[in-house]
Image: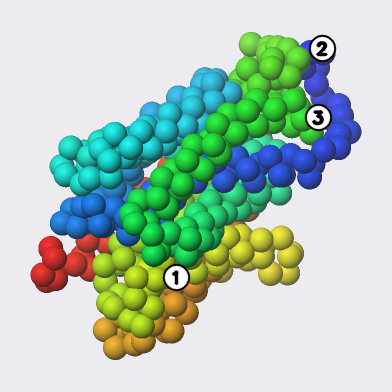
């Protein structure tokens, strides 16, 4: 055991190895941060069968987001004094419990619809939102004072959850399409796999604290005055002590104003994405030759391209770092709104698949570009705070987009 103090840790130790092992763990933790929620979205066709009049893909998104944003606002305000280890473990535990209860609820109701089952699904969706606020803000804030590759791996894991669930949805549809209750069997398999992944993440997060390179970064953060790492350092056998005198740090308001363009970038990225995906994909794209496969293919193409695109910024000359360039690219992306409208009205399924793929490609690429550039130049406590603020902006964009998504069904008979 050794001690890191804020006053005497002036010499920066050499970085230990284990970077790639930490990146793999970050990827899996990212996967676990959204796999449960993405499973709920991906089995949307099952919920449309159970609750055809309740717009499940749109309603569940609207239930999820206010709880995620509300919890994250509180956690962001108090983040400098919150035990990050307890926060993240609580988030993964809540995800595990809620996912398991979704499975139990379906088994208890024997896969029947009804308002009681639907309310139960909505309540568990609210738990997903609270868990998301704990994990995404906590993990991004924690990784922000480490290295950009960890942030990129975590963000890639978030997208991989969508790609994985889409792949599983294709496989389960192939396996159960002709069997009795095939949709329900596929949905149960989805939720069971998600429950296992959430349990695995609880174990992996405890292991993450003991990786040498993670201990190095957290020790460095402690030397710069970050108190959120104390519990993780203690779990790794390191005691962090602090002097009463700490350097003056920027407030949350000052950080937000200095990075208001990055905040706007994330809001605008997800306002557009969620105003189209998944509600528009399920309810507004019409019927085509692919039949019941059509929404599944669209969701899969979005998720796969979103995942792949998050690795593009690893190539230095392909990474967009200009603040002005990022904003221009994000604003230009709003041309997709009329493109989707006219394609749904006049185009065939090939053009819609292409557009949905491009939506996923730009979503993942621009998200990683913004999130990995933003924390440069700040001390560890400020990077942690900025990570929480940017995740809050991201969730705000998701919620706003989910609300705007309802505009697509104005005038439709199903409304």
Q: Is residue 363 left or right of residue 415?
A: right
Q: What is the quadrant of the N terminus in the image? A: top right
Residue 361 position, x and y percent, is 54, 68
Residue at position x 34%, y 57% in the image: 180
Q: Is residue 215 left or right of residue 262?
A: right
Q: Can residue 409 be seen in the rendering of this structure?
A: yes
User: Image quadrant of residue 70?
Assistant: top left
Query: Which residue is denoted by mark 2 in the rendering?
Result: 1
Residue 307 position, x and y percent, is 58, 60
Is there CB contact under 8 Å for labels 3 and 2? Answer: no
Categorize mark 2 by other alpha carbons within 10 Å: few (<14), some (14-19), many (20+): few
Is 261 located above or below residue 119 in the figure? below
Q: Is residue 172 left or right of residue 282?
A: right
Residue 325 position, x and y percent, is 56, 69
Residue 160 position, x and y percent, is 57, 54
Residue at position x 47%, y 79% in the image: 354
Tag shown at residue 297? 1
Distance between mark 3 and mark 1 Cα atoms: 42 Å
Query: Which residue is denoted by mark 3 in the rendering?
Result: 212
Distance between mark 2 and mark 1 Cα atoms: 53 Å
Q: How many marks?
A: 3
| Secondary structure at numbered mark 1 | helix
Residue at position x 51%, y 31% in the image: 92
Camera-side residue: 63 or 172?
172
Q: Earlier in the sequence, mark 3 or mark 1?
A: 3
User: Image quadrant of residue 109?
Assistant: top left
């Amino acid at each position: 055991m050794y001690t890191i103090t804020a006053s005497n840790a002036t010499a920066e130790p050499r970085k230990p190895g284990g970077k790639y092992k930490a990146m793999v763990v970050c990827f899996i933790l990212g996967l676990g941060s959204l796999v449960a929620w993405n499973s709920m979205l991906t089995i949307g066709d099952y919920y449309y069968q159970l609750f055809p009049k309740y717009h499940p893909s749109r309603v569940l998104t609207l239930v999820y987001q206010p709880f995620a944003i509300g919890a994250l606002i509180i956690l962001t305000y108090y983040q400098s004094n919150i035990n990050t280890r307890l926060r993240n473990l609580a988030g993964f535990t809540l995800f595990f419990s809620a996912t398991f209860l979704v499975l139990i609820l379906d088994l208890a109701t024997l896969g029947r619809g009804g308002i009681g089952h639907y309310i139960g699904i909505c309540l568990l969706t609210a738990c997903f939102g609270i868990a998301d606020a704990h994990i995404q803000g906590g993990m991004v804030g924690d990784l922000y004072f480490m290295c950009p590759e960890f942030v990129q791996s975590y963000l890639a894991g978030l997208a991989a959850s969508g790609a994985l669930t889409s792949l599983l949805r294709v496989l389960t549809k192939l396996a159960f399409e002709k069997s009795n209750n095939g949709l329900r069997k596929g949905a149960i398999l989805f939720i069971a796999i998600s429950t296992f992944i959430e349990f695995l993440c609880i174990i992996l997060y405890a292991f993450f604290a003991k990786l040498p390179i993670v201990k190095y970064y957290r020790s460095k953060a402690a030397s710069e005055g970050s108190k959120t790492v104390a519990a993780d350092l203690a779990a790794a056998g390191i005691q962090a002590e602090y002097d009463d005198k700490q350097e003056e740090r920027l407030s949350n308001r000052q950080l937000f104003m200095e990075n208001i363009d990055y905040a706007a970038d994330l809001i605008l990225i997800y306002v557009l994405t969620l105003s189209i995906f998944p509600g528009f994909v399920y309810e507004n794209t019409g019927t085509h030759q692919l039949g019941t496969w059509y929404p599944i293919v669209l969701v899969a193409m979005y998720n796969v391209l979103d995942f792949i695109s998050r690795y593009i910024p690893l190539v230095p000359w392909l990474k967009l770092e200009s603040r002005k360039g990022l904003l221009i690219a994000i604003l230009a992306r709003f041309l997709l709104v009329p493109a989707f409208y006219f394609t749904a009205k006049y185009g065939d399924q090939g053009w819609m698949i292409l557009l949905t793929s491009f939506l996923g490609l730009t979503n993942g690429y621009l998200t990683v570009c913004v999130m990995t550039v933003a924390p440069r130049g700040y001390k560890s406590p400020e990077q942690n705070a900025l990570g929480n603020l940017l995740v809050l902006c991201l969730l705000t964009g998701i919620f706003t987009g989910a609300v705007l998504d309802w505009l697509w069904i104005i005038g439709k008979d199903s409304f």
